[in-house]
Amino acid sequence: MSPHPTTLLPYSERIQLHTNPTAKRILEIMDRKKTNLAVSVDVTTAEEALEVVRRVGESVCMVKTHCDIIEDFTLAFSEELVKLSKELDFVIFEDRKFADIGNTVSLQYSSGVHKISSWADLTNAHSVPGPGIIKGLSTVGQPLGRALILLAEMSSSGSLAVDGYTKQTFQMAKDAGREFVVGFIAQSRIDTDISDGEDWLILSPGVGLAAKGDSLGQQYRTPKEVVGDAGADVIIVGRGIYGIKGGEQAVKDEAERYRKEGWKAYEERLQRQ
Ligand code: 5BU
């Protein structure tokens, strides 16, 4: 199969293909820092989370959070995260996976304990409720310059987000336009046929260099498989980095190892014609 045209374009040339400020910033950072690595900081205290971010910040284009697993979440924590995102030059992606009617998600996004829209540059949503979810989230996020990605596929085994569901999710994003929805969580750009000539960002979780999976259905592929073969843009790594044994330096070194692997796969991809 011939490569998808987007996968042959450098990140730097794709900046101009986006109007959303967060999408532009992601591509700018990727190009500037030579990284397509996102670290998923799935630890349960604010202090631990900030510590991981300080260690990996220089190596990443994005830090991914699950704010509802942080036991002592406060807005002081999110303010510190925003400060670090500016100092260390990365985007904050809250992996909230919104999945309700438009009115409810707009409240979940703007209000409650977490006030996600006040600090997260990027968030994501399931397509299962229909296009109202995009409308609801965009009323809050778009005026702030935030961006949304839809879950077209998941990395876990037995996921129902396959085939027709994936295609309809893609269609929903196309129908919404690219001012707020800028891409997808997907396992592949190629298999999902995300090929309408528009520059969608593809973020892929389920990346690991050591393990093949966990006991709860997670499945891992290498950066080469994800970026090189499947044509994704951003690799998302959690336990493979923050869970590494050996202390602070080991986490920092492991982030660099994944950054280099992801970047090598991207550079090799650009050579394919
Ligand atoms: P891991 O430790 O690298 O397995 O963590 C993966 C992270 O990505 C974790 O925060 C998940 O919630 C997240 N994730 C995922 O693993 N698979 C998916 O399809 C989606 C998110 Br969407």
Image (tube, helix red, strand yellow):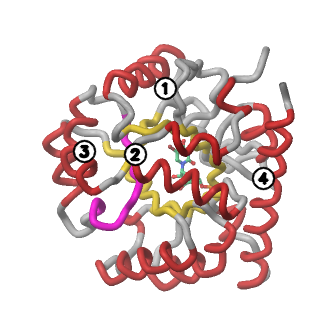
Quarter where residue 77 is shown: bottom left
Residue shown at 24% from the left, 39% from the top: 100
Q: Secondary structure at mark 4?
A: helix
Q: Going from the N terminus, do you reach mark 3 or mark 2 first? A: 2
> CA–CA distance between discs 2 and 1?
30 Å
Any magenta on residue 110? no
Amino acid at dot 4:
Trp
Q: Going from the N terminus, do you reach mark 2 or mark 1 first? A: 2
Q: Which of pointers 3 and 4 indicates the residue nearer the eye?
A: 4
Residue 160, label in figure: 1
Q: Position of residue 257 (x, y in %)?
A: 81, 64
Q: Is mark 1 within 8 Å of ligand 1?
A: no
Q: Position of residue 235 (x, y in %)?
A: 66, 49
Residue picked out by circle 4: 263
Q: Is residue 90 above or below residue 273?
A: below
Residue shown at 41% from the left, 66% from the top: 69
Q: Going from the N terminus, do you reach mark 3 or mark 1 first? A: 3
Q: Which of pointers 3 and 1 indicates the residue nearer the eye?
A: 3
Q: Position of residue 160 (x, y in %)?
A: 49, 26
> CA–CA distance between discs 3 and 4?
32 Å
Residue 137, label in figure: 3
Residue 20, label in figure: 2
Residue 107 placement, left or right of 209: left
Q: Which of pointers 2 and 4 indicates the residue nearer the eye?
A: 2
Q: Are marks 3 and 4 in contact (CB under 8 Å)?
A: no
* Other-residue count near label 1 (Cα within 10 Å), few / some / many at <14 / 14–19 / ≥20: few
